[in-house]
């Protein structure tokens, strides 16, 4: 409420109260002016406190640009749950503290320092470039993220990430002596049956349903898909964003061809995906984070035995070409996405499905984890001896 509105609101309420108390007009006017005056002062004071708090926040988030050590101080004030996680971790005595992504890194480092054990950092994102398309994030949050990674990684005995692009970027950005080890985020192997493509060709997007994942463009592209194709979008979604997608479906005139369905449990994800024919993922190429992405869904589509139709970004494209898993498209225009979908027919989809099932025998966690488990075991054994 603005000061003017607050003034008249308070004045009105005071006059009503004075009338009920039987006061005369001069007394009522005097009381109304005094109440409105002090209410205005209170509003001004609240606004000043609020602005001062915002200024302190900005200074705290910018401090790591000049003083890298300030990043960890800012980190612990970002979320009270960080302290809860630390206290929970302090009840354990593991050989290795494995920090999964940057938001766990200061917690794991503190636990390793104070309670013993080895620090290992496993990042699934390129945190330093994760939201560089957003000006507010670049100005306020990136200094803390970069400062935390730079300081904490110095003490990590092992750093792993999910793609070669991320590994190269981390080594370049932080001047690491050793390149991070690439451990791709693959699902455990499940043997899925080959399912021939039927009359209807079912296209699937599964994963988090939110802005920045090309879903609006995919929906608008459906109008140009051949009539045998339909799209299912599956995953957790806020009510607000679901409403936006429903509106996009209605505006595009594809209500009969696009479904929004709720998520399934992670343990059922691959099995449920096996009922579809094509796995779709359109990711904007607006940052290094996206360019070097190698997401879970890529390997889940492969494990489920789907033909892939994904953005032509380096990490995904490398595996699509190596294993001949499907088709790639460059750009986010709906017509480009539609052209890629329409380039598939039942024969090519079935061929890609068989190749995906074959590739899944290599692209799984049982294979991928061998190196990580072996290195962690060696680190733990060496630590025990010393």
Image (cartoon, helix red, strand yellow):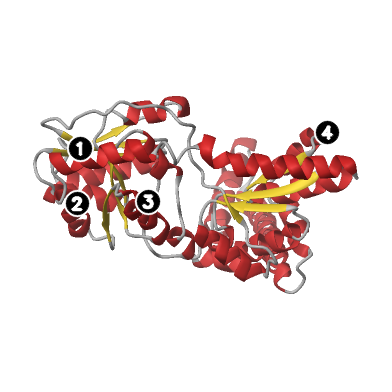
Distance CA(mark 2)–CA(mark 3): 14 Å
Label 2 packing within 10 angstroms: few (<14), some (14-19), many (20+):
many
Residue lying at 80% horizontally and 38% vertically, measured from the top left? 95
Q: Mark 1 points at which residue?
A: 350
Disc nearest the viewer among 3 and 4: 4
Using the image, tell me which numbered label, if any, was put on residue 213.
Answer: 3
User: Of label 1 and label 4, which has the lower sequence position?
Assistant: 4
Q: Nearer the viewer, residue 62 or 344?
A: 344
User: Of label 1 and label 3, which has the lower sequence position?
Assistant: 3
Q: Is residue 61 above or below residue 163?
A: below
Q: Which of 161 and 127 is in front in this view?
A: 161
Residue lying at 74% horizontally and 54% vertically, measured from the top left? 156
Callout 3 secondary element: loop
Callout 1 secondary element: helix
Distance CA(mark 2)–CA(mark 4): 53 Å
**Corner quadrant of residue 383:** top right
Distance CA(mark 1)–CA(mark 2): 23 Å
Would you say 135 lies left or right of 272 here?
A: right
Marks 1 & 4, CB-CB < 8 Å contact:
no
Callout 4 secondary element: loop
Marks 2 & 3, CB-CB < 8 Å contact:
no
User: Of label 1 and label 2, which has the lower sequence position?
Assistant: 2
Q: Position of residue 330 (x, y in %)?
A: 28, 62
Answer whether residue 373 is visible to the viewer in this image. yes
Check the picture and name the quadrant holding the N terminus.
Answer: bottom right
Q: Name the residue under label 2.
A: 221
Label 3 packing within 10 angstroms: few (<14), some (14-19), many (20+):
some
């Amino acid at each position: 409420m603005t000061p003017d509105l607050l003034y008249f609101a308070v004045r009105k309420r005071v006059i009503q109260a004075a009338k009920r108390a039987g006061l005369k007009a001069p007394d009522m006017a005097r009381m109304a002016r005094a109440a409105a005056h002090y209410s205005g002062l209170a509003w001004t004071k609240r606004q000043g406190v609020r602005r001062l708090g915002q200024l302190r926040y900005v200074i705290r988030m910018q401090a790591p640009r000049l003083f890298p050590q300030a990043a960890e101080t800012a980190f612990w004030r970002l979320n009270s749950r960080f302290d809860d996680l630390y206290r929970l971790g302090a009840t354990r005595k593991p050989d290795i503290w494995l920090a999964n992504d940057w938001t766990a890194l200061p917690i794991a480092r503190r636990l390793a320092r104070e309670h013993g054990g080895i620090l290992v950092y496993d990042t699934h994102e390129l945190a330093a470039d994760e939201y560089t398309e957003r000006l507010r994030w670049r100005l306020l949050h990136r200094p803390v993220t970069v400062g935390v990674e730079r300081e904490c990684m110095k003490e990590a005995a092992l750093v792993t990430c999910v793609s070669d692009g991320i590994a190269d970027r981390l080594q370049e950005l932080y001047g690491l002596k050793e390149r991070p080890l690439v451990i791709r985020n693959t699902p455990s192997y499940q043997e899925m049956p080959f399912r021939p493509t039927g009359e209807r060709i079912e296209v699937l997007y599964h994963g988090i349903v939110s802005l920045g994942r090309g879903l609006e463009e995919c929906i608008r592209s459906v109008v140009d898909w051949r009539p045998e194709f339909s799209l299912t979008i599956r995953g957790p979604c806020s009510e607000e964003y679901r409403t936006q997608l429903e509106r996009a479906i209605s505006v595009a005139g594809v209500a009969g061809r696009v479904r929004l369905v709720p998520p399934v449990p992670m343990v059922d994800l691959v099995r449920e995906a096996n009922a579809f024919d094509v796995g779709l993922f359109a990711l904007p190429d607006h940052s290094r984070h996206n360019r070097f992405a190698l997401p879970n869904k890529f390997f889940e589509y492969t494990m489920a035995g789907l033909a892939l139709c994904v953005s032509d970004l380096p990490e995904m494209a490398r595996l699509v070409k190596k294993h001949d898993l499907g088709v790639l498209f460059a750009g986010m225009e709906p017509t480009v996405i539609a052209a890629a979908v329409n380039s598939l027919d039942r024969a090519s989809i079935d061929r890609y499905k068989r190749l995906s099932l074959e590739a899944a025998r290599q692209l799984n966690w049982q294979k991928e984890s061998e190196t990580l488990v072996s290195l962690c075991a060696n680190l733990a054994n060496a630590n025990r001896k010393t």
